[in-house]
Amino acid sequence: MDTRSMIDGVDVTTPNPSDAGSGEAMAQPFGEPEPVPLDPSRNAKVRLGDRIFRGLAEGSGVFIVALIAAIGFFLLWRAVPALARNEENFFLYGGNWITTDTSAMHFGVLDLLQVTVFVSVFALVLAMPVALGIAIFLTQYARRRLAGPLAYMVDLLAAVPSIIYGVWGLYVLAPVLAPAAQWLNVNLGWLFLFKTGTASVIGGGTIFTAGIVLAVMILPIITAVTREVFVQTPRGQIEAALALGATRWEVVRTTVLPFGMSGYISGGMLGLGRALGETIALLIILRGTQEAFGWSLFDGGFTFASLIASAASEFNDQFKAGAYISAGLVLFVLTFVVNSLARAAVAGKGAK
C-alpha cells in the first residue's frame, strides 16, 4: 500500500516497505551499479600469478645474498693457508709484499689500501663537481635538441675500454700534464700532497695522472645517475619558484638540488665503487714501487686490483695465489663497506 501526501500541491507517493515482497522490484539508488559477480576461475589465476611473481622476487633476492656470501666464503677459504704462512707482524698493517719463498712469506696490505683509497678519493673529488655541473646544465639550462646529444656523448665515455684509457693517460695525457705537475711540485712542494714522491713527476706514472684518468672514467656513471634524478624534480615546484620571481639558479639551488641530493650521493658512491676496482688503466699508468707510500700525488704504487693483475703468473701456486686472494678479500670488504655507507647516507638524506 502506498502512502500519499500533498506537498505544495504536488502528489508525493512513498512506497510502503511491506510491498517489497509483493513482487515489485525496488529501484537501485542512483550512481550505485549492481555488483558484478566475480569469476572464481579468474581469481584463481590472479592469485597463482601473484604467488609465482612473489616467489621469483624472493628467490632473486635470496640468490643475490647467497652469491655474495659464497664469494666472501671462497675468498676467505683460499686466503687462510697463505695467511697461516705469513710472517708479517700484522697483515693489515704490514707494507711488505714478498711471496717468492712460500715457506716464509711477508705480505701486508697497508700500502695497497692507502694507494687504492687515495687515488679513488682523488678521482671522486675531481669528478663529482664536473658531473654535478653537467647534470644541472643538461636538465635545467640546455635546450632539448642540445641536451640529448650532449647526454649521449657523456654516456659514450663509459663504453671506452679501460686499456684505451690507460694507454691514452700514459702516452697522451701525462706529457700534457707534466708542466702543471712540475709547477705544483716546485711551488707547493712544502705541502705533503705535492711533495716529491716515489715516481717521476715528468714521467707521468703517478697518482696525479692516474687520478685524473680515473675521474674521466667514473664521470659518466655519476652524471647519468644525477641527471636521471634531477629530471624527476616535480614540475609544479619549479614553476612555482619561477612564478615567485626566482632566477634559474635560485630554482636549482632551492628546488632541484634538495630534491636530487640523495641521487647525487648515490651516483658518487657508485663511481667510488667503480674506481676502487679499476684494474687495467691503473696497471698501465701507475709505476709500482716497494717504497712506503707517502700520501703525495706524485707517488707511485699498486692498488689492490692492479697488484693482483700484475701477478697473474704466480697463481699456479696455491700459497702465492692465496696471498693475492687475501688482498682481494680486503678489497671485497672495502667495497662492501663503501656501499653500505652510501646506502646509509642516502637513507638519512631521504629521511630529512
Image (cartoon, rainbow, N blue to C red):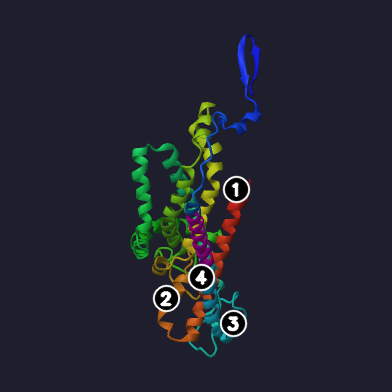
Disc 2 or disc 1, which is closer to the eye?
1
> SS for tag 3?
loop
The earlier-in-sequence mark between 1 and 3 is: 3
User: Tag 4: residue type?
Assistant: Leu
Can you name the residue that lies furthest to the bottom here? 103
> SS for tag 2?
helix
Location of residue 11 (image quadrant): top right
| Residue 88 tag number | 3
Disc 1 or disc 4, which is closer to the eye?
4
Q: CA distance from mark 1 to mark 3?
A: 44 Å
User: Tag 1: residue type?
Assistant: Gly
- The picture places residue 20, in percent across and down from the top left corner, at 61, 31
Disc 1 or disc 3, which is closer to the eye?
1
From the viewer's perspective, is 187 left or right of 178? right
Front residue of 151/126: it is: 151
> SS for tag 4?
helix
Residue denoted by label 2 = 310
- The picture places residue 17, in percent across and down from the top left corner, at 65, 29
| Residue 350 tag number | 1
Front residue of 268/96: it is: 268
Residue denoted by label 4 = 67
User: Are the residues flagged by discs 2 and 1 in contact, CB closer than 8 Å?
Assistant: no
- The picture places residue 112, in percent across and down from the top left corner, at 52, 71
Q: Give neighbour class at mark 4: few <14, some 14-19, many 20+ (Cα, 10 Å).
A: few
The earlier-in-sequence mark between 2 and 3 is: 3
- Image label count: 4
Question: Is residue 51 a member of the stretch shown in magenta?
Answer: yes
User: Tag 3: residue type?
Assistant: Glu
Q: CA distance from mark 2 to mark 1?
A: 42 Å
Q: CA distance from mark 1 to mark 4?
A: 29 Å
User: Tag 2: residue type?
Assistant: Ser
